[in-house]
Image (cartoon, rainbow, N blue to C red):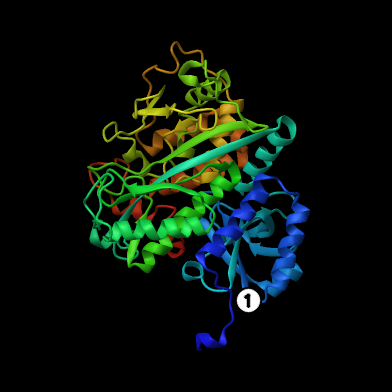
Amino acid sequence: MSNDLRNFLALSYDELEDLNLRAKEQRLSRVPVETVREERLRYLTDEKRIKAVTLLFSDLEGRLHMLDYDKKFLVKNWDNLTFDGSSIRGFTAQRESDLRLGMDWSSFYWGPADVFGNGKVLMFGEVIDRDGTPYTGDIRSVLKIYADKLYEEQGWTLNAANEIEGFLFNGANAERHYHETKTFEYVNTGGYFHSLPSDPLRTFIDTVAEVQRAMGFQNEKDHPEVAPSQFEINYSYGEVVAAADQIQLYKLICRQVATKMGLTACFLPKPVVGVNGSGMHTNVSISQDGKNLFWDPKGEEQLSSCGWQFLDRILTHANDICLVMNSSVNAYRRLDPHFEAPNQIIASPVDRGAMIRIPIGNHRSMRVEVRAVAPDANPYMAMLAVFKTGLEGQTAEIENLRQAKRYLPDNIYTALDDFRNAEWTTTLLGADVKARYADLKQAAADRCPRLLGTIVKAPEVQFHHEVYNQFLWNRF
């Protein structure tokens, strides 16, 4: 059918940026949800060129799911959207499969038509149980409830910014074909900060950065990373739920842009042995009435006592929550003590082998950087673990806690044992969700060789939760 007959929404990147920044300001200003909902419904009704709303939600492992609702249907039925939860790994059992999707009206995004398709807007959904309460397996909702409670009771805003590394490999679906090829092929071997202006890696980075900018990410810097064909595209911090949403959108944008180039954007923590792996350094702070509670110009490293206490609690529970931050078999290859791996349970302003770093900051930017988070972690669960542990966890009575020589697990089985045996992870997630999450991680581990060895094995790629292949999993 000729495109001339279709009158679907396709806005310029400048127009998209203006719309998305206005929506972002509404989130930051905490405009009442009723006001935002009415505004969005009125917009959807009046904007005839929109054909569908893409609703996004994440499963227990952090895998992103998307479904399109016809715009006219959604405007009339937004408060009664149902789906089969038993088809989502880690969600309900078949006998209790019906779940609902609520709309988080504040999480409204306009996406470039050349990436997401003409006539569509995006929104994040909230999974609702049969009784109308937030579904416990939807960690986004759990995180949102936790953050909102702290704001209402303490006036605290939880802030996060993530530095997400990834690799760009030759060929579409390179991960799905890894069991055949036994290798990933670089598109660039230049290394840190180095690529030619129009080579595939630079073109990919530039394109992703343009899409992010149009979607209101407010970019900061982008560059090739240390390993060959590795990239990092940084953007500004945000309130914790919006920040976790942006992680999901970032990876979605990278994958879509790469696919359109005939390439693969890969977020395996260590897809190639012998070079640096990929991390998701998670920078966090807490503000109250616009004041950064982690800043103290007279504090050690200019970090406040509140910040140091936050940091100490994370160090105390580091092994308990390691499985949340490093959720795949492959993630434990990255925790190799070589290649700047942050596997030491210490805090340092300079040591990049430290699990936690205290970067140079000021009254605006002072933060704690948790470096031991892998890019394939469920971003909502990782954020919940970092903030709730930092605020509510215990502090161990260990001499020189911040520099004691302790290490994170070097394999998923040890991490599973630590996770299952820890009382704190039951407090963090609840007994039911904790058990389901551990079972999913156990199933992935048991499908892979127990010993990592020195080469990346096909099963650790095939059964990686982000290389989604429902047919393959259903064969077991």
* Amino acid at dot 1: Arg
Rendering quarter of residue 151: top right
The answer to which image quadrant residue 412 occupies is top left
Left or right of 293? Residue 217 is left
Describe residue 457's horizontal placement relative to residue 46 as left or right.
left
Q: Give residue 361's position: percent from left, percent from top.
A: 47, 28
Instruction: Return the x and y of residue 133 as percentages of the image width and height.
Output: 74, 49
Q: Residue at x 78, y 54 (%)?
A: 34
Q: Is residue 54 left or right of residue 114?
A: right
Q: Which residue is mark 1?
A: 49
Nearer the observer, 109 or 363:
363
**Disc 1, SS:** loop
Residue closer to the observer: 85 or 188: 188
In the image, what residue occupies the spot 24% across and 58% down? 185
Where is 70 relative to 344, above or below?
below
Q: Where does the image place residue 87, in percent across and percent down from the top left?
A: 57, 61
Q: Nearer the viewer, residue 305 or 291?
A: 291
Residue farthest top in this picture: 399
| Residue 469 seen in the figure | yes
Q: Residue at x 58, y 59 (%)?
A: 18
